[in-house]
Image: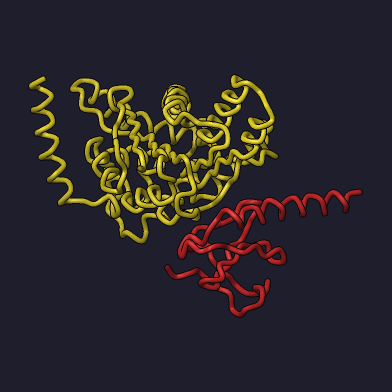
Chain colours: A yellow, B red
Amino acid sequence: MSMRSIYRGLRRNHSRLCSHLHSHATSFGFKEVREEDKSQMVGNVFTSVASSYDVMNDLMSGGLHRLWKERLVSRLNPFPGMKHLDVAGGTGDVAFRILDSIHGVARRAVGDIHDDNLLEETQIFVCDINPNMLRVGRKRAQERGLGDSKSLIWVEGDAEKLTFSDASMDGYTIAFGIRNVTHIEKALAEAYRVLKPGGRFLCLELSHVELPIFKDLYDYYSFSVIPKVGELVAGDRESYQYLVESIRRFPKQEKFATMIAEAGFQKVEYENLVGGVIAIHSGLKF
Amino acid sequence: MVRRSGVLLKSAATGISSRLAEILVCPLTKQPLRMCEKTNSLISDSIGVSYPIVEWIPRLVPSDGIILQSDQDLNSSDSPQTNSS
């Protein structure tokens, strides 16, 4: 236990130093960029990777990203009739899982007309700033037979300036997206704005590993293996270099939890998966 | 037959789009949007900006907005301008 508190102390000092040196809004991985340029540069990354995004996720995580998304959706506890917003969810992974889960819930419940109406009232909005990612998502929806589903709505929008009215959503998820936003605080504030009282905020994101030997293995994997795989499979080493660097630049679990609380959320918690490689942060709007 | 299914597809698209206008708001002002079928876009009357719908996906990123030159619809010959935010 004492090792952990020493670690925490070291971490706190390190992050205090870091926050004086850089800001998330001007970091593009390890590069420093102008704040107004970051959004465009991130956009270019995702335009480039869109078509191989899902394949690369499988390769880089050994298929584990599917389990992580399952965990996110089960934490969300979707219900028929819910209005849900999945931000930065371009290719639809989380949205499809939420829909499947809701149909599963409806099947298990005692069937009556009321339930069917609720099912129809379900609305899952997939919002992404990148049209290419959305295009891939829509195509995948069609392949899964969800092309005509009135419950799946694709919108191109900015996490920092959402196109939804106040208190209109029962749930908000952002999976592997908040790291790419220029101003995290604005995205969190918008999340708070669009959620109804009682609404839940859930964020699935790559986070920080502190376990001694595992951290070194993870660093090796991140900086030596991933950009190489990106080069071979997606033909784009730079984008995957940005990816692994941006993970390191993102606030640590505790700091991010504080930021979520500062946006107004209550009962802010986080759950580490794979020793901190992944963290699921959650909050409630009262 | 082909023409009728084309019309049906178009009306399905505008049906979805008019539903969108009921749910979505202008990302800048958070005021309601109005569907314009002629230009297939969502209009934010509060600031006079039109957001296009491309391949059934509405583009509601602030920089996608096109400032309307007049009270009428946008001319197709106009080059898109970015909305300053």
Q: Examine the image and state in which quarter residue A267 appears.
A: top left
As drawn, A149 above or below B82: above
Q: What residue do we see at 56% from left, 45% from top? A: A134
Percent of width and height locating residue A85: 49, 43
Q: What residue do we see at 61% from left, 57% from top? A: B21
Quick check: A271 left or right of A57? left
Which sits in the foreground, A16 or A122? A122
Q: Examine the image and state in which quarter residue A4 appears.
A: top left
**Seen from this angle, which residue lies furthest right?**
B1
Please state the total of marks drawn on the protein image: 0
Quadrant occupied by the C terminus of chain A: top left
Percent of width and height locating residue A268: 29, 36
Q: What residue do we see at 62% from left, 41% from top? A: A138
Q: What residue do we see at 53% from left, 41% from top? A: A83
Q: Is residue A59 visible?
A: no
**Seen from this angle, which residue lies furthest bottom?**
B70
Which sits in the foreground, A220 or B32? B32
Quick check: A252 left or right of A187? left
Q: Is residue A251 visible?
A: yes
Quadrant occupied by the N terminus of chain A: top left
Which sits in the foreground, A37 or A119? A119
Percent of width and height locating residue A159: 43, 51
Q: Examine the image and state in which quarter residue A3 appears.
A: top left
Percent of width and height locating residue B65: 53, 65
Quick check: A222 left or right of B63? left
As drawn, A264 above or below B34: above
As drawn, B53 above or below A80: below
